[in-house]
Amino acid sequence: MSLSTNTGSVGTPLLPPKGVSARVLGGIAEDATLSAPGVFLIILAFILPIGQMLLLSIEGASGGLTTEHFTRFLGDSYYLGIVWRTLRLSLLITVIAAVIGFPLAYVMAHVGPRLRLWLIILVILPLMTSVVVRTFGWMVLLGRGGLIPFTLWKLGLVNRNFTLMQTESAIVIGMVQVLLPFMTLSVLGVVMKIDRRLEEAARTMGASFTATLRTVVLPLAMPGIVAGSLLVFTLSVSSFITPSLLGGVRLPVVAGSIYEAATKTLEWNFAAAQSVILLVGVFLVLLPYLKLTGRRHG
Amino acid sequence: MVKAVPTSVRIATFLFVVLTLVFVLAPLVVVAGVSVSESQFIAFPPNGFSLRWYSAILTSGAYLGAAWTSLKLAVLVTLCATVIGAGAAITLHRRRLPGTVLLAGLFLSPLILPTIIFAIGLLMLWSATFGPVSFTALWIGHTVVALPYVVRTTLAVLAESDPFLEEAAATMGARRWQRLLYVVLPQCLPGLAAGAFFAFNISFDEAVVALFLRTPDLVTLPIQIYNQLEFSPDPSVAAVSTLMIGVTILLILVIDRLLGIQRFTGA
């Protein structure tokens, strides 16, 4: 889903130089009242918690300010290994999602509206299903004696006790499934707007199907692919339920490490510091995403 | 002469789409398959056919308790998110308030920021302010997560609405509250309805905030499933999961029937 909003600039001039009409002021008062509950909720229940987290990340044991939680994380090769695994897997997940998502979106854009609707529903179904439910499905499919290891064993490729559970492959497979809709819809939104005549022109001029795809459609779809990739990447680095259930304790990722520190070992300052590191990383990736989608939707 | 798309490409495309759909849907089909298994153990393909795991969950206090918590939570979250989101969306659409762009960013920010970061912040702030987490904390947390969806679906509907209707009503002498109640709100309704179903689905399925705020007395259905998965799952987990998939499918179809799902997917 794209994160666009329909707001442009403020339509009504704020304060006309003279004689502010009661009507304008009344309108502002009405809208202020309408949006007040939302503003309160977001500030008290969203901004404030994040502020609290930022505060805890630099709070020392005796109450003073400290950077020890950050240096503990960044100075430990164990945690750096977790960061490296998270980044590596997220990149792989993003690339696979793009490789599947682009052709899928292209096909969806070219079929009839009815079929397209059904494809959209089928693709977003896993997205709307609870993360624990779909992860459970993968546990059954990938575990010892599950359908996939069993098939591989029957084909003589692996031994009988083979399992894909607790491997990085399991994490990648499970994550690609749920993040694919973000990529597909992101690309579909752009591909639908490409002028069909451009493709026809290229074909008329003698370009083959694949050449048209490569030199006309792909470059024009790039904004969608890039936006989708940035979105998939940020969602991927901040996931922990699927990675922890499919990867197990031996393959922790950053978000899983935050969860451990916050709820199991109860080191809140350390958990907060890790969250800040994740937040900064996500922001670095999201800024170009917001720029990109902001421009696209004017 | 335009060369036709080669048959090999057509066949490959067809296979690709089918395989992708299999990949995307397989885990859900497998869950449904396991749920009707006769055997004690989780196995796919299932051994035999029985509904014993469905009757097992209907007599399990843990599952029924979690289901009640989830249902209560989802209804309350839907109510709050829809009411608050309606006001927010109308304001954003009118663009009369100074700083509308900032306001839009504020309302949609829970969608952009990773939920885990919000969840841990909420846990820390709630514990520091009120002590142990409670149902109310989860209610507030889910409302924040669901709010942007209501705002977005309502904005999408308002963008297509006739901007002159409210002006016409004003010219005809309708007061502010009358215009809001009889002109603007009815225009929002399809978007609000879609947003409400999204909100219900999000709260009912959400696991990240619920996991951070989990206490022995505060277990939603997804968390109950998660607990089982961490230890020793039996096919009853599959039965609950299948019912949850059923709820999701129902909600998607309702949203699509009411308004067309395509309008809200950005495509």
Image (tube, coloured by chain):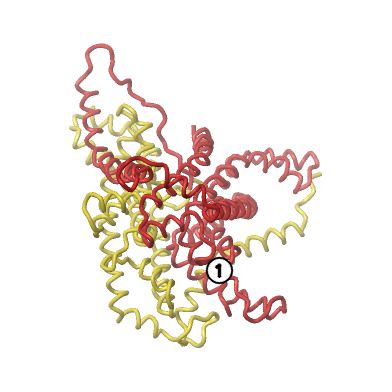
The answer to which of B44 and A185 lies nearer the viewer is B44
Q: Quadrant of residue B156?
A: top left
The answer to which of A22 and A285 lies nearer the viewer is A285
A282 is higher (above) or lower (below) than B175: below
Looking at the picture, which amino acid does disc 1 mark? Gln
In the rendered structure, the colour chosen for chain B is: yellow
The chain identifier of the residue carrying mark 1 reads: A
Q: Residue at x 69, y 58 (%)?
A: B13
The answer to which of A51 and B79 lies nearer the viewer is A51
A100 is higher (above) or lower (below) than B159: below
Q: Which residue is mark 1?
A: A166
Residue B27 vs residue B242: left or right?
right
Residue B162 drawn at (x, y percent): 36, 35
Disc 1 packing (10 Å; few <14; some 14–19; many ≥20): many
Q: Quadrant of residue B132?
A: bottom left
Q: Residue at x 30, y 42 (%)?
A: A48
Residue A160 drawn at (x, y percent): 65, 81
Q: Residue at x 34, y 79 (%)?
A: B57
Residue B136 drawn at (x, y percent): 23, 56
Q: Residue at x 36, y 66 (%)?
A: B223
Residue A18 drawn at (x, y percent): 24, 11
Q: How many marks?
A: 1
Residue that protrudes farthest toward the top in the picture:
A18
Circle 1 SS class: loop
The quarter of the rendered structure image containing the N terminus of chain B is top right
The answer to which of A122 and B99 lies nearer the viewer is B99
Chain that is coloured red in the picture: A
